[in-house]
Image: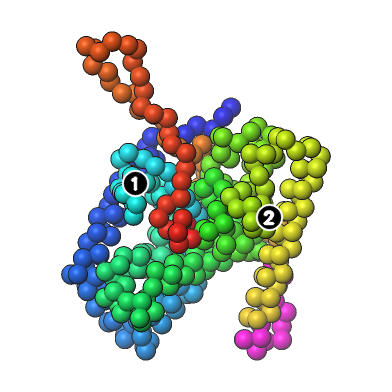
Amino acid sequence: MSPQPIPRHIERLALRLATEEAERARAANTLEGAQAIVDRLDAESEAAGFASVKEYVESLTTDRGGVSPPEGAHPTSAFWSHGTHHPEAPQNWTGENFLDNRYVAEAWAVVQNERSPGSARTLETTEGGHRLNEMHLFEDAVRQALGGDEQGFTYAWARDCWGSISQTYAEASEGPVVVFSETAHTRSILYNRELPTLHTNQDVGLANIHFAYASPMEWSQEARNEIGPDAVRAQVQVDDPTLPHYVDPVAYTTQDPVVRKAAVEAECASVAAEREERAEEKREAATTAKGKDAPVPEASAGEAPERTTKPTAAVPVWQMGFKPVPVKIDSAHAGPATQSAPPPRPALGKHAADTGLG
């Protein structure tokens, strides 16, 4: 049975969350709103003993305590990237009505927590993620009020702040995690920081990374069967043939079945080896920095250790997009009744496309 589109109740809640966040962003991008944020950050950084707001913000992005669940809690952590056009969604930076998967993930978490409190979370709903989100660092007026490009408050800096806290969030995650995206785009934080961290996180591992969306419908059945599994999509990339670990889903059916399957397996093995090598370097650096001679437990690049407490959030398996809503046709017009256009193909949102966020 084919996966169904994103459920209507999730769609409606996601649209409401997106609209509310867009309104807050617009308020932050005014002179008054931006100055209020700067005044608050000045006070917070001074109270925390930091020499500058910049140092204060950067410290928050590496504070694991700010993105860790409460003691004894084991929620299913959600990650997101990309999004899709939606006629009722707020406009993005290009003037398109676009719904980031962030809000679909948040809507899913809300529903899960209604059924079982504390069972699901997203980065933006953690203490650290919420605080960073309230800074609205992607808004031009806020960065300008902080000092602008001349003082290092660039768009790239804002992107790196979110990349840093996203990685910290992935490091603090446990057990099964759910990824709200069809694939991991090579410019996204999901591909460059979150998935590599989850892969080598001893409390997650490759086997516990689950995609909320089935592989793209435009892929051939062979591609969906062989590139579509979660473990493969969590490692290879399908958007940039000039970069490593590229697999072409369009040309997949033209290739010899034995050869193509071996190639995919080789790419996955290569990704796993590279990630483990980077993880080992990070562990060695951390050990050296702490000055400890005790060995650091090895991270698993595959299955995570068995958990005593399993999260209760159900991992969805949906098809990206929304069920078309029938359009009422005036009886005076001839011809059969029609429906609204089918769901548009997913596209990259503002932060996922040109900044790598998501």
Q: Position of residue 181 (x, y in %)?
A: 51, 48
As displayed, is residue 118 above or below residue 333? Answer: below
Towards the viewer: 248 or 122: 248
In this view, the residue farthest toward the right is: 258
Query: On the picture, is 285 further left or further right than 60?
Result: right
Towards the viewer: 229 or 155: 155
Can residue 206 be seen by looking at this rendering? no
Quarter of the figure with residue 66: bottom left
Work out how far the residue at label 1 is from the one at label 2, CA to CA, in angstroms.
31 Å
Helix, strand or loop at mark 2: loop
Q: Which residues are magenta?
A: 287-299
Towards the viewer: 129 or 331: 331
In this view, the residue farthest toward the left is: 32
As displayed, is residue 79 above or below residue 51? Answer: above
> Which residue does the image show at 28% across and 70% down from the upper left?
142
Residue hosting label 1: 96
In this view, the residue farthest toward the front is: 242
Helix, strand or loop at mark 1: loop
Query: On the picture, is 297 further left or further right than 314?
Result: right
Can residue 152 be seen by looking at this rendering? yes
> Which residue does the image show at 47% across and 39% down from the upper left?
345
Residue 161 is inside the magenta segment: no
> Which residue does the image show at 37% across and 46% down from the upper left?
98
Q: Mark 2 is on which residue type? A: His
As displayed, is residue 24 above or below residue 299? Answer: above
Overall secondary structure of the magenta stretch? loop
Q: Mark 1 is on which residue type? A: Glu
Query: On the picture, is 250 further left or further right than 9?
Result: right
Residue hosting label 2: 245
Quarter of the figure with residue 339: top left
Towards the viewer: 66 or 320: 320
Q: Residues within 10 Å of mark 2 (few under 14, many from 20)?
A: some
